[in-house]
Amino acid sequence: PGYQGDANLSKMPKDLRTLWREYQFGLDGNKPAKDFTPQERGHVKCIYCRRKVFWDAVQMLIAKGFTWETAVDRILTVYGSRHSVSKILHELRKDRLAKIDRLS
């Protein structure tokens, strides 16, 4: 609330830690993704929806007692630290749709 930055998402985040920082704090002067209004989410709907599965996974792990750093490490361990951000997001989404929980 009251944040003055633009509601934009980065084009190609280099890693999952950057993706989490984008959600929590914003990148390059942009508003944190967690604070986007429904209208702002709509302007970047495709990108936002692809990344939301990761943001939800980190939040779920934090609720179970992980720090955000250990939550990201857990996701990398399960989904493969050598995979690209896009590949990990794709696998997370596939598991969500199939109702498979590999992170617990």
Image (cartoon, rainbow, N blue to C red):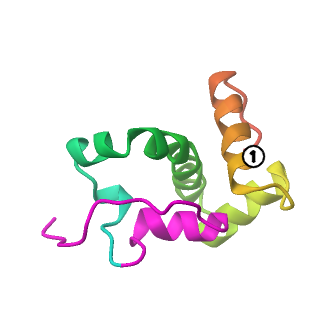
Residue drawn where x is 48% and y is 63% of the image: 10
Q: Residue furthest top?
A: 98
Q: Residue 5 appears in which quarter of the rendering?
A: bottom left
Q: Which residue is mark 1?
A: 87
| Residue pictured at 69% horizontal, 49% vertical | 86
> Where's residue 47, x and y in %?
48, 45
Is 89 included in the stretch rendered in magenta? no
Viewed as shown, does residue 68 lie left or right of 46? right
Task: Write the start and end of the magenta stretch as one range.
Answer: 1-28
Is disc 1 surrounded by few (<14), some (14 to 19) or many (20+) residues within 10 Å? few
Q: Is residue 23 above or below residue 91?
A: below
Q: Nearer the viewer, residue 33 or 71?
A: 33
Magenta stretch: helix, strand or loop mostly: loop
Please, what is the three-letter code of the amino acid marked with disc 1? Lys
Judge left or right: residue 62 versus residue 34.
right
Which corner quadrant holds the C terminus?
Answer: top right
Q: Secondary structure at mark 1?
A: helix
Position in image of residue 91 (x %, y %): 74, 38
Across and down, in percent, residue 72 comes to 67, 63
Q: Nearer the viewer, residue 46 or 76?
A: 46
